Image (cartoon, rainbow, N blue to C red):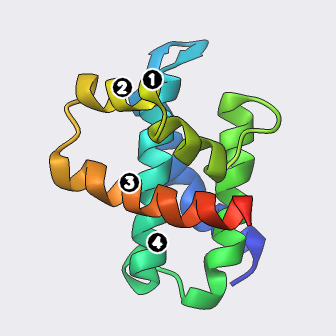
Amino acid sequence: MTLDDIRDRFTPALDEIIDRCRITDDFVDREQFQVLIATIWGNAVVDPERSGIEESDLEDLHDFLNEQIDRVMGEGATISSCFEFIVSKEGDESLERQHVTANHKEFLHYFARLILQDVQA
């Protein structure tokens, strides 16, 4: 699958996520958006086929998600920065406000440790 195929397949889902996070026409709940994107990435890595892709497509999905994160969060924002937010004090407080379950939070923190360890290495 090419990056364009990934865009075609996942753009409707990302548009739906952005709409779900939309507070006004010009304002998106950035905290909720980051949690949802991190969840999508984690699920795709755990079981690519369930996400409709193959393991070899993960790199293109990563690039696509980074494009979408950049569009919503601003230049320089990436999947890694979403996980940095999640493990921050502000992120922890946001997870509580969003009523993220303990299992979901553990899942996100697990991936944060993996991803941020790779970034720091």
Q: Residue at x 28, y 55 (%)?
A: 106
> Which residue is the site of mark 4?
44
Q: Which mark is residue 90?
A: 1
Q: Are marks 2 and 4 in contact (CB under 8 Å)?
A: no
Tell me which label, 4 or 1, sits earlier in the chain. 4
Q: Earlier in the sequence, mark 4 or mark 3?
A: 4
Residue visible at 31% across and 32% down? 95
Q: What amino acid type should be assigned to the residue bearing mark 2? A: Ser
Tell me the amino acid under the disc marked 4. Answer: Ala
* Badge 1 element: helix
For marks 2 and 1, give the CA distance. 6 Å
Image quarter of residue 55: bottom right
Sequence-first disc among 2 and 4: 4
Q: Is residue 64 left or right of 48 when viewed as pictured?
A: right
Spatial separation of the CA atoms under disc 4 and disc 1: 25 Å
Q: Neighbour class for label 2 at 10 Å: few (<14), some, many (≥20)?
A: some
**Residue type at numbered disc 1:** Glu
Badge 3 crowding class, 10 Å Cα cut-off, few under 14, some 14 to 19, many 20 or more, is: many
- Look at the image and tell me in which quarter the C terminus lies: bottom right
In space, the residues marked 2 and 4 are separated at their CA atoms by 23 Å
- The answer to whether residue 46 is seen in the rendering is yes
Neighbourhood count class around disc 1 (C-alpha, 10 Å): few under 14, some 14–19, many 20 upward: few
- Asked whether the residues under the numbered discs 4 and 3 touch, taking CB atoms below 8 Å apart as contact, a structural biologist would say no
The residue tagged with tag 4: helix, strand or loop? Answer: helix
On-image quarter of the N terminus? bottom right
Front-most of residues 112 and 32: 112
